[in-house]
Image (tube, helix red, strand yellow):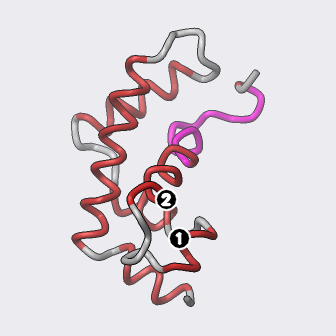
Amino acid sequence: MDALQLMAEANDKGFKRRVKYFMQKAAAAVLAEAGSVSGHDLRAAYANKVLVGSASELEMAMTVVTNSTIAAAGAFLSPDSDIEFAVNSFWDAFAGVTAAEVV
């Protein structure tokens, strides 16, 4: 699937809703994690942005479609488990956690 098609799918209302759901789920999990987790303060700050609605699900959706498994299948045909994996994989990047902060 080419980039233009993936970007169009990322902008689809239904796909963005799926991404938002997994962002909300991840946010709740992050806020429940131990404070000793690497980058927790930044991860929790992003979680709070997600929960109050100030994080962009479009930006996350556009990043999620860069996942090779999702790109191969297409956003619409990707199972929820792949979308959830991608959201969780990109969480630290959106939170601003750098490699230096990961122990």
Splitting the image into 4 quarters, where does residue 51 fall? top left
User: Is 63 left or right of 14, judged from the image as shown?
Assistant: right
Going by the numbered disc 1, the residue's amino acid type is Ile
Q: Main secondary structure of the magenta part?
A: helix
On the image, the x and y values in percent for residue 32 come to: 39, 17
Residue shown at the point (44%, 58%) measured from the top left? 83
Q: Is residue 13 magenta?
A: no
Residue shown at the point (47%, 81%) measured from the top left? 6
Splitting the image into 4 quarters, where does residue 101 fall? top right
**As rendered, which of 7 and 28 lies closer to the eye?**
28
- Report which residue position mark 2 lands on: 82
On the image, the x and y values in percent for residue 24 come to: 30, 40
Residue shown at the point (56%, 76%) measured from the top left? 71
Quadrant of the rendering where the N terminus is positioned: bottom right
**As rendered, which of 76 and 54 lies closer to the eye?**
76
Q: Earlier in the sequence, mark 2 or mark 1?
A: 1
Splitting the image into 4 quarters, where does residue 10 fall? bottom left
Mark 1 residue crowding within 10 angstroms, few (<14) / some (14–19) / many (20+)? many
Q: Could you tell me which secondary element the residue under label 2 belongs to?
A: helix
User: Is 39 left or right of 83, judged from the image as shown?
Assistant: right
On the image, the x and y values in percent for residue 48 come to: 32, 29
Going by the numbered disc 2, the residue's amino acid type is Asp
Residue shown at the point (59%, 65%) measured from the top left? 67
Q: Is residue 98 magenta?
A: yes
- Report which residue position mark 1 lands on: 70
The span shown in magenta is 90-100
Quadrant of the rendering where the C terminus is positioned: top right
Mark 2 residue crowding within 10 angstroms, few (<14) / some (14–19) / many (20+)? some
Q: Could you tell me which secondary element the residue under label 1 belongs to?
A: helix
Residue contact at pointers 2 and 1, CB within 8 angstroms: yes
Q: Is residue 34 above or below residue 101?
A: above
**As rendered, which of 29 and 55 lies closer to the eye?**
29
